[in-house]
Amino acid sequence: MTAPGDPASERDGAAEFASEWAAQVFGLTLVPMTWREMVDFLHGLTVRLAAMLLAPGLEAAAAAQVGVDLVAAKLIAPEALARTVTVLGGQLLPALGLAGDDTASARLEQIIETLSVAHCRVVRDLAMDEQEIVLRSAMRARREAEDRLRAEQARARHAALHDPLTGLPNRGMFADHLDRVFAGGGTGRAAVCLLDLDNFRPINDSLGPAVGDRLLVELARRLGALAAERGWFLSRVDGQEFAVLLEQTGCPEDAAKVADKVLSAVGEPFHVDGQELTVRASIGIFESPIAVSTGTEALRSARTALHWAQHDGGGRWMLFDRERSAAQVRRYRIGAAMPGALARGEFRLEYQPLVHLATGRIAGHEALARWTDPELGTVPPDTFIPLAEDTGLIVALGKRLLTQACIETADRPHRTRQPPFVSVNLAAQQIRQPGIVADIAAVLDSSGLPPDRLQLEITESVAVDESPHATRSLQALVALGVRLAIDDFGTGHANHAYLHRLPVHGLKLDASFIRALNPPGTGSKVEAILANLISLGHTLGLTVTAEGVESPAQVDLLRTLGCDLGQGWALG
Amino acid sequence: MEPGWVPESVDVDRPSLARIYDYMLGGFHNFAVDRELARAAIAAMPDAAVQAQANRAFLHRAVRFLVDRGVRQFLDLGSGIPTLGNVHEIAQGIEPQSRVVYVDIDPVAVSHSQQILAGNERAITIHADMRQPERIFADEQVRRVLDLDEPFAVLAVAVLHAISDADNPHRSIAAYREAQVAGSYLVVAHGAEGVRDEESKRLLEIAARTTTPLTRRTPEDIARFFDGYELVPPGLVWASLWHPDAPSQVPDRGEDSGNLVGVGRKL
Ligand SMILES: C[S@@+](CC[C@H](N)C(=O)[O-])C[C@H]1O[C@@H](n2cnc3c(N)ncnc32)[C@H](O)[C@@H]1O
């Protein structure tokens, strides 16, 4: 040991002491100090303590600062203070060569007390500060979690109501909005314009769905700009379908103007991926007082009108019309009811006589289909026949009616030498059936009706069909002995070349000619045309029948013109 | 944050591992529920706090070691509550360009961490689950801070034992390894089986009451985390024995530090 007060040895002693101190507390700090840094730090403190020991009086603030600095170095654990107290009390004075120095010893006690108090106080403050921090962090974390939850809920809500591709309100949201508007009551009016792209499919198919999607996004942007400017509620309701809800319209024309605007906006070429795309759209419009409709009906009606627009060739708008729709609905119900009616045998025949105009004798009857449905009431043939043709039911229906006509005619008693024939319509689709000739032969066979008592009426459109099958079938039917008449003659084709080719027996002049004769005997053009048609028939050796004869005057005139047979109210 | 992931709400009425660990280190970022559990843990394992401190000290040495070896990027999984010697303080203290991403599942730890790091462009904290590496690497902020084309160190210090076998932590670590280029590092500290098993068992029972229960693994299972890495000397050792700072810091019984630790370099 060196003498006290020797600066050189004092420094050595301080360094040694610092190492010892560090060894006691190093593991207890939580600051990432290296061993070296810790020893240096504690050496600095030791030097300050040595100065305090030797100073004439104790500067309490300096002693307290040592405690504060220990805390700053995160030597805050109770153990750190305890070991510091122990090492200071036991080893500092000897290390500094002050062992046995009573003044220094008393001073050291003061120093230890002061720095311990400071250490404890600072640690307590630190504890309270950190408590505040962690509480605030917890509150912030909770707030953030709630914010995230809210944001997520908002996002989910938005996603549930919007189309992910275009960001527009989706069908669900549109329907909700529509329902609200139409449920609102009051005297206002509103409209829905439903838009569909006519030629989207080919674009999508040929250029790929990615281009298709971008096109839709572009379209949504364009319509979105219009909608934002004019306060429309725009939605993408389906793949390539967009809907606009217009509130407070005054009349259907208001909606039609919007549809015009939309169509012209859609008509501007689109530039997608360096390609110029031209699209065409159709729009169905429904416009109505809100009091008399509902959101569901509005959208459904707009869709119906959209189908009309598309059916008419697209590239246009169409306004929903209740009557047209009602007629369509009725046609739909008729079409749906027919197969059942046929199965239940609800179609019956009415026979209209074909009368020799010269003698008044009955030459034959035309079998006319009649149908009365329990719910739909009496459905006229000019409604159900075209429908049956559309659905293909005409084949079964035609065969059924033919069979019925043959049986009923064969069964009807007659006394004349030349019993009347029955004339039955044969539809184009029936002729196209592969087994048609055999079918008719079988019907004749089973009914027992002689073939020459059956006349089949075909339209000119069938007659001009030059397909080998149709021609062969008609020839085969004639070969069976069946008579063939051209129905509705004079209305369809100006070219009558088929009359050479087909073994036709008669012509039936369309009722429209006869109707146009009123008032009869005025020497009208119609009269001249009729005279011509009749003489054409006679030149070819054909029987000419006039349909739709409604007055005795017409009977007289037709007789004068040399027409063979007549058919209509005036003739029973 | 990716939409669709809503972390569960913040529950400060349940003890949290992050805050208990803070208490063990001598910090005050904890609540009464945490301290109560921590005291129970110390009753079961009287030197639990010393073990925590030894673990933290190892983390400090490992980071310094890696910075010395030229590592400039750190992904600290289960980083805990900051304040007491954080990775970015050490790394940026030596090499200011160092970049650090902290990940923790504890919302309070994350929130506090984010406050501390506000304004530090090279260090961020994200709230995520380390069992979902894809999410972490997909995070935009993470990608801004970490350059995955350069080596980075994955720190999994005292966190893997918070993940049960059912969640397959080895697979997660393999996913982190897949994301690393050669020359990257993995740092692991993990509570090991085979020493003081009675006390450990009681400690685990207590930990089961926190939001993140603990598990312990055999040295072999711990070593398997380093598949695909080469352990730097001295290999997998007790925390206090890994590159001790000074001879005085080497305890008589190294196994008392509870955690086996290692630093591996990706091959
Ligand atoms: C014991 S602390 C370790 C802190 C720091 N790594 C250290 O060694 O000093 C464990 C931390 O891991 C976090 N943790 C637990 N499970 C986690 C998970 N699945 N994903 C992310 N962090 C998790 C806890 O919230 C806690 O903060």
Image (spheres, coloured by chain):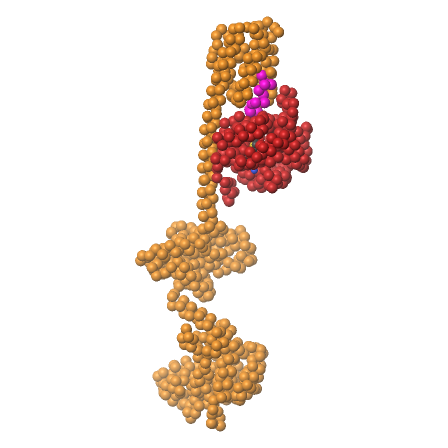
Chain colours: A orange, B red
The reply to whether the magenta stretch includes residue A463 is no
Of the pair A555 and A97, the residue shown nearer to us? A97
Image point 40% across, 87% down: which residue?
A: A571
Q: How many marks?
A: 0
Q: Is residue A554 visible?
A: no
Residue extending furthest left? A187
Residue B82 is situated, as x and y percent measured from the top left of the image, at 53, 29
Which of the 4 quarters of the picture holds residue A24?
top right
* A419 is higher (above) or lower (below) than A337: below
Splitting the image into four quadrants, where does ligand 1 fall? top right
Q: Nearer the viewer, residue A22 or B228?
A: A22
Q: Which residues are magenta?
A: A21-32
Please name the residue shown 47% across and 20% down the image: A121
Residue drawn at the location 47% of the way across and 94% of the way down: A416
Q: Nearer the viewer, residue B89 or B13?
A: B13
Q: Position of residue A149 (x, y in %)?
A: 46, 42
The residue sitting at 62% across, 35% down in the picture is B216
- Report the quarter where the C terminus of chain A lies: bottom left
A306 relative to A26, above or below? below
- In the picture shown, does residue A155 fall above or below A240? above
